[in-house]
Amino acid sequence: MAAAPEWRLDPLTGCRVLISPDRAERPRAIGPACPFCEGHESETPPEVLAYRSPGSSPNGPGWRVRVVPNRFAAVRLDAGEPAASATRAQTTPVADGPGSPGFGVAEVILECPQHETAFGKLSQSQATDVIQAWRDRLRLWRDDGRLAFAQVFKNEGPVAGASVEHCHSQLIGIPFVPPAVEDELRRIASGRCPYCDSNTRLSLTFVTESEYFLAMCPIAPRFPGETWVLPKEHAASFEMTPDEHLSDLVRILFDVLARMDRVFGQPDYNLIVRSAPFRHDGTWHWRIELLPRVTTTAGWEWGTGLLINTMFPEDAARLLRDAG
Amino acid sequence: MAAAPEWRLDPLTGCRVLISPDRAERPRAIGPACPFCEGHESETPPEVLAYRSPGSSPNGPGWRVRVVPNRFAAVRLDAGEPAASATRAQTTPVADGPGSPGFGVAEVILECPQHETAFGKLSQSQATDVIQAWRDRLRLWRDDGRLAFAQVFKNEGPVAGASVEHCHSQLIGIPFVPPAVEDELRRIASGRCPYCDSNTRLSLTFVTESEYFLAMCPIAPRFPGETWVLPKEHAASFEMTPDEHLSDLVRILFDVLARMDRVFGQPDYNLIVRSAPFRHDGTWHWRIELLPRVTTTAGWEWGTGLLINTMFPEDAARLLRDAG
C-alpha cells in the first residue's frame, strides 16, 4: 500500500487536490479476466452490501448487485482523524510539510454479475437494484455521522475515466463539503427553488419526462448534450427517494441515454448524483447529471477555469427531443 | 459560419461556459494534407504576423513563425459589443434568452514551416521565435485596449485537446478577467510575493533552474508531474520579458519537457502562459504551467470540482530532478 492520501490546497490559486498514490496502482481490466464478474468475488475486498438470491453466501456467486470497498481508494477511513478544517491551507505555495489527511470512504458498486459494459443495456430490474444500492449506501453513510458529503458517480468508457469496463459506479465520501457545492448552496439559498418552476416543461431546454421525473439541458452545459434528470417534486436528498420512484427513475435515465446514443454516437459519459450535503440547511433540489464526453478540456480550460462548449443547450435539447 | 458565440452563466452552479458552434466545424488534420505546413498558406486566413526571410511575400512560403486568425474561433471581434458586464448572469437556471456575446480574439501561432509535431523538437532558434511571437501578440492586444485578458496556451497531442498535430499554439483574448484569475489576484494581493521567496531553490518541489528562470512542481498539482517555470526576478507580465531572456526561457522549457518525456513516457501536455490581466493592480508573478495529461478527469472531478492526483509534488520533483 502506498503513502496515505492527503489534501493539498494552493493558497493562491485556490486549487484543491487530493493526492492519492494508491490510485496509480489500479489495474485496467478489459475482457475475460474481469475482477468484477460473478465467480471472481475473491479478487475484490469483501462485500459491504449485496442483493443476493436466497441461500447464496456472502462473497460467492448468486448476487445481483454487490458493493465493495475500493481496493485503490482515493480516501481511507484509516488516513487519520479529520482536522477541524479538513482542508487546512498550506501557508505558502511551496511545499512546507504534509497537507490534511485524506480521510473518507471509497466504495465500488458492481452493477451486474454478467460482463456487461453499458449501464443502459442492463435490464430494468438490474438498473433499479443499482440505483437502490446508491440510495442505501448514501443513507448508511449519512447516518454514520463521520462524513459531511458523498458523491455517487459513474464513469462509462475510457474517455470518461473508467479503468475497468465492467459496469460499475462509485461512492466517495469526505468529511467536508466541496467548495463548489457550498457555493451552489449559498446561491440557491435566497428565494424559492428555481427548478420547481412549473414552466420548465415549456422551456427551450426541456427534453422529456416520466411520471416522477423530468430531463432538461442546463443553461450552461459543460459538454454538448449535457442533460440533467430532476424529480418533479422538490426534494433535497437523492437518498430519500422512495422505493416506488426507483424504477421510474431508471425508465427516464434509459430513455435519455438512448437518445444520447442516437444523437452523439454512443458517447462515453459521466453520471453524477448531485444531492445535498448530509447536514444541509437551505434549499436544494437533487439531480442526476449526464455528461457525454464528446469534447476534451485543453489549455484554455485549465488556464482560465472557463469552459468552451460547441453546442447551445437549446439545440442539444431539440436534437434529444427529436431522438425520442 | 455558425451562430455567433455566447457566454452562458448558470446562476446557481456558477458554471460559466462559452458556447461556440464554430468550434465544432474544425478539422482534425493529421499527416501530409496539413494546412499548417509551408506552401499551404492559402488554407488559413491571411497572416497577422510573420517572421520571414528577407524578400519573401506575406501569405507565401519563406516564414519561420506565422500567426493567423483562428478560422474556427471560440470568440470573435464581430460577435457584438461587450456589455458593461460581459458575463451577465442568466436570471434563472432555465434558458430565458440569449447570453452575452462571445466578443474577443482567437489566433493560432504556426510554430514552424516543416511538419514537426513536438515543440520540444524544434530548434532552439525556432522555439525562441515562437515565444517572441506569443510576447509580441500579447503586447499588441494589451495596447489595443478592447480586451481585459488573454490566454496563450498550447495543446500538444490529442489527449491534451489538439485537433491539428502540426506544432501550434493559441491566443484567446476576452473583454473580462476570468473569475479564477481574479480570485488568484485577490489572494496574492495581500503581502509580499510568495514566489519570490529565495528558499524555493531549497524546497522539496524544486526541479531545475537556468540563468533567469526556475522550475518547480506546484503545491497542489492537477496532474502527476505538473511543473511551473517562473522568472527568478519578480515580473507580473510575460509580455514584458526582454529579448535577452527569451532563449534562456526556451532552454529551461526544453530541459523540463525532456525530463517529463523521460519520466512519463512522452505524455501529451498543455502549456499555459499564466500572465497578469492587461490592466492589473496588485502583485502577480507570471509563470508557464506544464500539465502532462497522464490521467483523466472523471465523475468525481466534474461532480465536486475537486481533483485527484496520484503523485505527490515532492515525489514528482524528485523524479524530474533525477531525470536531468
Image (cartoon, coloured by chain):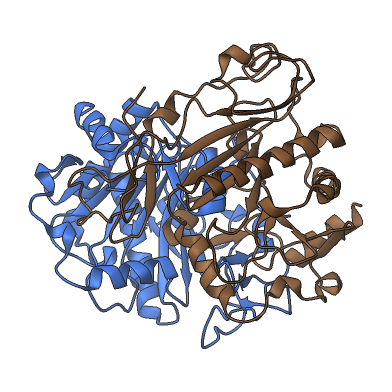
Chain colours: A brown, B blue
Q: Tell me which residue sits at (35%, 72%) in the image.
A: B277
Q: Quadrant of residue B46?
A: bottom right
User: Which of the two residues, B225 or A109, is positioned nearer the viewer here?
Assistant: A109
Tell me if residue B134 comes above or below residue A145 in the rendering. below
The spot of residue B216 in percent (x, y) is 22, 44
Instruction: Give the number of callouts.
Output: 0
Q: Quadrant of residue B34?
A: top right
Residue A314 seen in render: yes
Q: Is residue A321 left or right of residue B27?
A: right
The spot of residue A124 in percent (x, y) is 86, 37
User: Which of the two residues, A230 or B115, is positioned nearer the viewer here?
Assistant: A230
Tell me if residue B58 comes above or below residue B36 in the rendering. below
Q: Tell me which residue sits at (55%, 60%) in the image.
A: A307
User: Which of the two residues, A162 or B208, is positioned nearer the viewer here?
Assistant: A162
Q: Is residue B219 left or right of residue A281?
A: left
Q: Quadrant where the N terminus of chain A lies? A: top left
Tell me if residue A279 comes above or below residue B84 in the rendering. above
Residue B36 seen in render: no
The spot of residue B250 in percent (x, y) is 26, 46
User: Which of the two residues, B75 or B31, is positioned nearer the viewer here?
Assistant: B75
